[in-house]
Amino acid sequence: MTVPVPYRVVAHRVDTPDTATIVLEPADAALPPFAPGQFAMVYAFGVGDIPLSVCDIDGPRLAHTVRTVGAVSGALHDVRIGRTVGVRGPFGTGWELSEAEGRDLVVVAGGIGLAPLRPLVLAALATPERYRRLNVLIGGRTPDDLLYCGEPWQAAAGVRVTVDRAGPAWTGEVGLVTTLIDRADFEPPRTAAFICGPEPMIRATAADLVHRGVDPDRIRVSLERTMHCGTGHCGHCQLGPLLLCRDGPVVGWTRAEPLLMVREL
Amino acid sequence: MTGCERDSADAVIDKDGMDALITILAARGRTVVGPTVRDGAIILAEISGGAELPYGWGVELEAGRYRLVARDDGAAFAHSAGPQSWKTFLHPPRVREWSADRDADGTIVVTADDTPVPAYAFLGVRPCDLRAIAVQDRVLTGGRYGDSAYRRRRDGAFLVAVECTEPGATCFCVSMETGPAVGPGYDLALTEVLDGDGHRFLVRAGSGEGAAVLAELPSRAADSATRSAARDRVAEAADRMGRTMPLVDLRTLMRETLDAERWNDVTSRCLTCGNCTMVCPTCFCTTVEDVTDLTGDHAERWRHWESCFDRDFTHVPTGPVRDSPRSRYRQWATHKLGTWYDQFGSSGCVGCGRCIVWCPVGIDITEEAHALNRERGRSTAQEAG
C-alpha cells in the first residue's frame, strides 16, 4: 500500500472538448522522479484515484492529461488551480528511450495515447545527437480531438497527423494512423518504435512495422487495463502472465503480441 | 531417534496439553483463532479453551456439498478445509487503508491507517493452508511494494500447524505437493494420534518462539510408538486423496489450452458468482472504495475483497476487457494454475478443494484440468495424424 502525497494544481489547460491537462507541484515533499511512460495514481479528494501517465516532467512538477470518462477523471478534469490532489507513484515501466540510441525513432500515437509519448518525444528532441531520424505520427478521431496542437515541439518533431473524421476546415490527412507510416522516414532494421493508443490501433501499427522489417524486440507499446493499487496487489491489471502496473504499462511487442491475440485475455 | 526424521525436540501432549497450549498462547498476549463448530460448519473463530475445538466432528465434502458429521472417535482435527481460510485474518475482507482531511484552504493531509493489529495465534493450520499463507506472503510482501499492514499481521502471527490425517473427498494436496505432511513455516506442528494408547498429539517446534511455548507445555518425551503412528496416519492420508490433478505441467497445460472447447463447457455451468475466489486461501484481489463524511472534508480509502468473476473487474473506458463468463472462468483457472508462476514464482493453487466444495453448481477444478488435458491430447493426436 502506498499513501497519496499532496500535490497542488498550478496550471490547468483545456485541450479538447473532453480533455484537460493539469500541472501539479508537490505541496511538501516530492515523489521520486518519474520516467517517460510511467504512471501515477492521481486522487481526487473523496472521489477516488485513477492511473494517469505523465505527459510532462519538469523537475518535481508533473503534468497529466485527463480525458473525462468517469467520476474521478471528471473531478480531475474540472479541478481548479490552487486545489490539492493526491499522487502516488511512480509506477510501472517506462519507454526506455536510452535503449534506442543510434536508431531511427518511430513514435505512433492514437488519441490520448499521445500523452505518455509526449515526454518521450521531448527527451528525443533534447538530445538529437543520440538518435537518427525522429518520426512522430499522430491519429485522432476528429480535428477537435487532437492534443497539444501548436506546441513548439510538434513543429520541431515534424509531426504527421491524420484524423478519422475531418471537419469542413480540415485540410490534412484523413484515415488510420497506419496510413502515415508510408511517408515516415526510417530504415526498418535500424528503427525503434513506440506506440500508444487504442488496442486495435496498437495491434495494426505494430503488425505494419514488423511487416516492414522492424525488429519486434525494438517495438514498445503502452497498454491499458484497470488499475486500483499500482503496486501489484489488487489483481485488476492482469494480462495473462503480466501485472501491467508492475510489468507494464510499457511492454515489448514480442511479449505483448501473443497475449493481445487471445480474445478477452 | 528411532529411525524417524522428527525433530529431536518433539514431545507428546494430551487434550489437557491442548488446553494448556491455548492458555499459554493467550497469556502471551495472542488472540487465539482455531476451528470450532458453528452454524453447521467448522469455522475459524477466536477460542479461549480446548473445549471449543471440534472434538468428535468431521466433515463430508463433495462438489457443491459440505456437511458436518459426528465422529465417534472424538478427534479434534479430523476435518479438512472449511468455508474460511486464514486470509480472513491476515488479508481481511475489508480494511481502511488511509484517511484524508481537507482544511479550509484546501490543503490535504493524508494519514495511513495505523489501527493496531492483533497478535494472532492460529491453531489448526492445515499443511495446504500453511502453503497458502506462504503464497500470499509472496504476493503481498514479496515485490517492490509491500503491503505493510499485511506484513504487520503476518509478522505477529504464531502458526500452529496440524498435519492432515483425514483428507476430504475434494482434497488434492498430494497433487499440488502441499500436504498432507506439514511443510516449513510453522511455529509448532502437531499430529493427532488416536489409538489404543489414547488420544494425543505429537508436537514439534519450528521456531524459537515455538520451542519456548513447547517448553512451557505439560508434555512428555515423544515415544517411538507415537512417532510411528503419527507418521503412518499422515502417510495413509496421502493415499486417500479424494481428487488428483493430471500428472502434467499445469502451467504449460494452461498456456496451451487458452482456446479449448472445454472453456465453453464449463461456462455453460458457471454462474460467475465468485464463491471460488472468496473461499480460495490464495485469491488476493481487492478493489477500493472512497467515502467521505457529511462535512465532505474527511475522506477514507477502504479496500475490500473483489472477484475476477465480477464483470466490472476489468472495466476500462471502452467496457469490460473480460466480458464473457468464459473469459472470466478461464482467467481464474489459468491464473491459479498457470500465470501465478510467472507473476509470483509458484502455483496459486494449494489443493485444498474449497473451490470445489463451495461452488453452487459443483464445478471441480481438477475435473476441468483433466478435461483440458484430454482435449489437448486429442488435438495433438489430430495434428500428428
Image: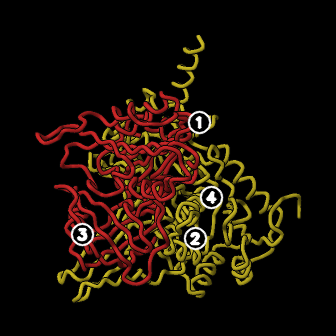
Chain colours: A red, B yellow
Would you identify the image quadrant in which residue A53 lies?
Answer: bottom left
Q: Is residue B260 above or below residue B17?
A: above
Assess disc 4: are there few (<14), some (14-19) or many (≥20) residues with their C-alpha within 10 Å of its C-alpha. many
The residue to which callout 2 is attached is B123
Earlier-in-chain disc, 1 versus 2: 2
Q: Tags 3 and 1 in contact by the CB under 8 Å rule?
A: no
Who's the residue at 54% across and 41% down the image?
Answer: A218
The residue carrying mark 4 is B127
Characterize the local packing of mark 3: few (<14), some (14-19) or many (20 or more) Cα atoms within 10 angstroms.
many
Are the residues flagged by discs 3 and 2 in contact, CB closer than 8 Å?
no
Which of discs 3 and 1 lies nearer the camera? The answer is: 3
The amino acid type found where label 1 is placed reads: Thr
| Residue A129 rendering spot, x and y as whole percentages | 55, 53
**Residue B198 horizontal/vertical position (percent):** 70, 66
Q: Can marks 1 and 2 be said to lie on one chain?
A: yes
Mark number displayed over residue B252: 1
Q: Are the residues at dot 4 and dot 2 in contact (C-beta closer than 8 Å)?
A: no
Label number found at residue B305: none
Label 1: few (<14), some (14–19) or many (≥20) C-alpha neighbours in 10 Å: few
Q: Quadrant of the C terminus of chain B?
A: top right
Q: Chain of mark 4?
A: B
Any part of residue B371 in sight: no
**Chain ID at mark 3:** A
- Identify the element where label 3 is drawn: strand
Residue highlighted by disc 3:
A12
- Of labels 1 and 4, the one closer to you: 1
Amino acid type indicated by mark 2:
Leu
Q: Residue at x 48, y 54 (%)?
A: A124
Q: Are discs 3 and 2 both within one chain? A: no
